[in-house]
Amino acid sequence: MQKFKAINRAQVLGKTEEHLYYLNERVAIHQEMKPAFDAIVTAAKTDGIDLKIASGFRSFDRQLMLWNNKFSGKTAIKDINGDIVVVDNLSSLQIIESILLYSALPGASRHHWGCDIDVYAPNLLAQNYQLQLEPWEYSESGPLAELSSWLLQHAHRFGFYFPYATFQGGIAQEPWHLSYLPLAQQFQQTFSAEQLAQTLQSSNILGKKVIIDNLDLIAKRYINNVCAAPTNVILT
Ligand SMILES: [Zn+2]
């Protein structure tokens, strides 16, 4: 198995950029994923697919802003059917669980790691098409069907898999979210709910007390509840 530099707490929590490589001004990935990412991009290109990242690394602060915007009602919360959730009669915990369907807690997003990316293929989309990152776009009848089927066939050869391949009662299905297993499994092992609680305690996250009081449930249902990697994923 490949040897990687040790992963530290700040990297797990999205509090540092020291592990990143910027592909352009907007998109950064884990430095040590760069060779595997270049290889999968090249292979996809050979098959006529222009593999691009819609979202790579995201910091704690950015995730915190997304979270607080949803909790405060600035951004709409959507349910599994894409309908807006009416929060008026919901408890704080119910609001928190509604947000967690699509948005991770700051400090617990796999996008902090840099080895998890949301992908698409602009060359399969009509000009001016606005990517929604909704499952239908990646389904058999969607514009990105060819990308989905290519990834299902080939991603494992480069070390990638889909941690949100199916809905398991926690986070919604995300057919665009790829994870680089050799690094992701180490981040996953380094994650600690206690460290997350400490970090959230000293942040200005909305819903703080209810989140921290229910962190065990949240970790079990939303953070650790990911699909197992297929056994054919190449780790070297
Ligand atoms: Zn994602």
Image (spheres, rainbow, N blue to C red):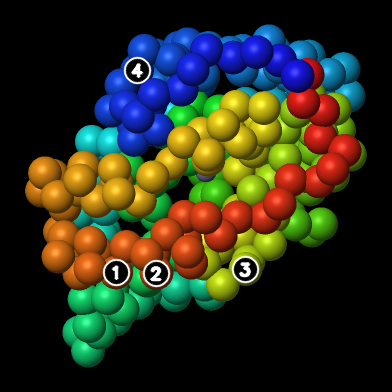
Q: Which residue is mark 1?
A: 214
Task: Identify the residue position indicated by label 4 in the image.
Answer: 17
From the viewer's perspective, is 34 left or right of 161? left
Instruction: Name the residue at 52% across, 72% down.
Output: 80
Pinpoint residue 148: horizontal percent, then vertical percent. 77, 44
Q: Amino acid at mark 1?
A: Asn
- Asked which secondary structure carries label 3, the reply is loop
Residue at 64% from the left image edge and 48% from the top image edge: 163
- Relative to 202, does residue 122 appear above or below in the rendering? above
With respect to residue 201, does 23 lie above or below?
Answer: above
**Which percent across, then down, holds residue 71?**
21, 63
Whether residues under marks 2 and 3 lie with C-beta atoms below 8 angstroms apart, the answer is no
Q: Which mark is residue 217?
A: 2
CA gap between label 2 and label 3 equals 15 Å
Q: Does the beta carbon of the residue at mark 1 sit less than 8 Å from ligand 1?
A: no
Query: Mark 1: few, some, or many residues within 10 Å (few <14, many ≥20)?
Result: few
Q: Is disc 2 placed on a helix, strand or loop? A: helix
Is residue 146 visible from the viewing direction of this image?
A: no
The answer, for residue 22, to whether it is visible in the render is yes
Q: Earlier in the sequence, mark 2 or mark 3?
A: 3
Badge 4 amino acid: Glu
Say which residue appears at 52% left-offset and 55% top-offset: 224
The answer to whether marks 2 and 4 mark residues whose Cβ atoms lie closer than 8 Å is no
**Front position in the image: 53 or 90:** 90
- Give the number of the disc on residue 166: none
Image x and y of residue 43, in percent: 84, 19
